[in-house]
Image (spheres, coloured by chain):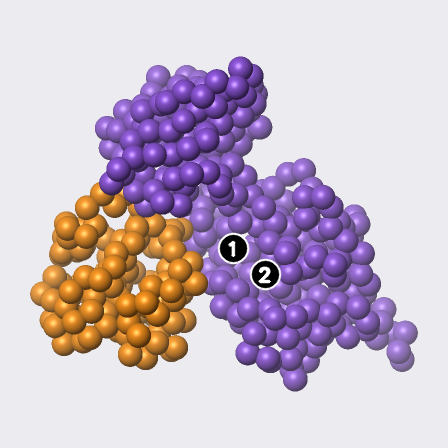
Amino acid sequence: MSSYDAIIIGAGPAGLTAGIFLSRSRIKTLILSDVIPGGQLILTHKVANYPGVENISGYQLASIMKKQAVSFGCEVKANVKIKNIELNGEKKQIILNDNTLLESDIVILTPGGRPRNLGIKGEEEFKGRGVSYCATCDGDFFTDKEIIVLGGGNSAIEEAISLTKYAKKVTIIHQFDYFQAFSYLVDEAKANRKIHFILNSTLTEIYGNETVKGVKVNNLTTNEINDLYTDGVFIFIGYVPNTDFLKGKVLLNNKNEIIVSKNMETSIKGVFAAGDCIEKEYRQITTTVGEATIAAMSATNYLYNKLRFKV
Amino acid sequence: MLYTNLKHIEKAEELKKIISENENVMVCCGRMGPMCIPVYAAMEELEKEYTHVCFYDMEFDNPEAHIIRNAPETKGFMGLPFVIYYKNGKVVKATSSIQTKEQIKEILDTYFK
């Protein structure tokens, strides 16, 4: 069994930030991640609104965060799966898939989220053959083609604008008659002659032969379904929290987001949470980093009070 | 330049030599992008488990990668990375876009028993 003062579950910006703050306070900290460190940050081609950094790729920013955490003594174990987690009691226990037993006084939950799939006919079948989740990765395959962007948040609108560099026509399809994206982005999209809009609508099917050739569009007001020609579908319809393994362990809301206090404490003593897994309104790298700082400082106080009480 | 811990293929001739000399070969052809990085990471991990498979990457924008970009098996591919699985020098499977570690394992277990 390996013992730590703190174990952080998840190595996105929240987990890495908590790792930096805890390790710098000389708290023996381990970060666990089921994939390579960086979380959804590595899915971001360019970060332009992180204060103090003019322009950087998400991958680079995540790499720097990891390097900082490690420089303060934080351990990072990537590509590990959790078999069981026991959060009640003074000592928290985590068993990994290879039966390694880990123990800690505090746990910080930062498992993040993952892009939401549409879950309609043709989505999986045409993945990589016209269905994409990354404009910067696949945009050049759609040069002079017609494409659809599904979604109305910041990611959808930003990616639609970015795709006009390649495609001859971009149609944004959104389920509401308004956008959740920042108004300056919506204004930029509306001013772009290559971008068209279909509102109050969603997709019910993606079809084609070797590649995507069309979609069925469901008008949510009239319930009519119409065919629309397209060469590709880019899907940006939000995220779901990676909290399945926490059901019954900490208090979650009806969206499976972790409920936390203003100090980022969960319903369980000694367990804190931050990032895209928690119940909150705004999801930015900067908000996540702030929450993780609060979680780490609250956890530090919790640990010191615990030690003081023992003495 | 691909910043991975996998062995890199730089030339088309090199790929031909590798698949002629090895029974099971998996090649991921991509960039350092968000859909490609998780595939490289999964391959790095699987390399330890599947010792009978040779794992390589190749940079998509390398002109020599035409051997993968223009392969008949990748016709119609519109998502990075392009991944090709070779058995005894022949393509047995090709995928486009991101794949999970579990999806890759399923392919390895099916074609490279």
Question: Which is nearer the N-term, disc 2 or disc 1?
Answer: 2
Give the letter of the chain under mark 1.
A
Q: Mark 2 points at which residue?
A: A10
Residue at 67% of width from left, 66% of height from top? A22
Task: Look at the numbered disc 2 and give the secondary structure of its residue.
Answer: loop
- What shade does chain B have? orange
x, y percentage for residue B54?
26, 73
User: Is residue B70 something one can see in this rendering?
Assistant: yes
Mark drawn on residue A220 = none
Give the letter of the chain under mark 2.
A
Q: Mark 1 points at which residue?
A: A39
Front residue (pair B70, A37): B70
- Kindly indicate the quadrant of the structure image that contains residue A97: bottom right
Q: Which amino acid does label 1 sit on?
A: Gly
Callout 2: few (<14), some (14-19), or many (20+) C-alpha neighbours within 10 Å?
A: many
Front residue (pair B21, A122): A122
Residue at 68% of width from left, 48% of height from top? A257
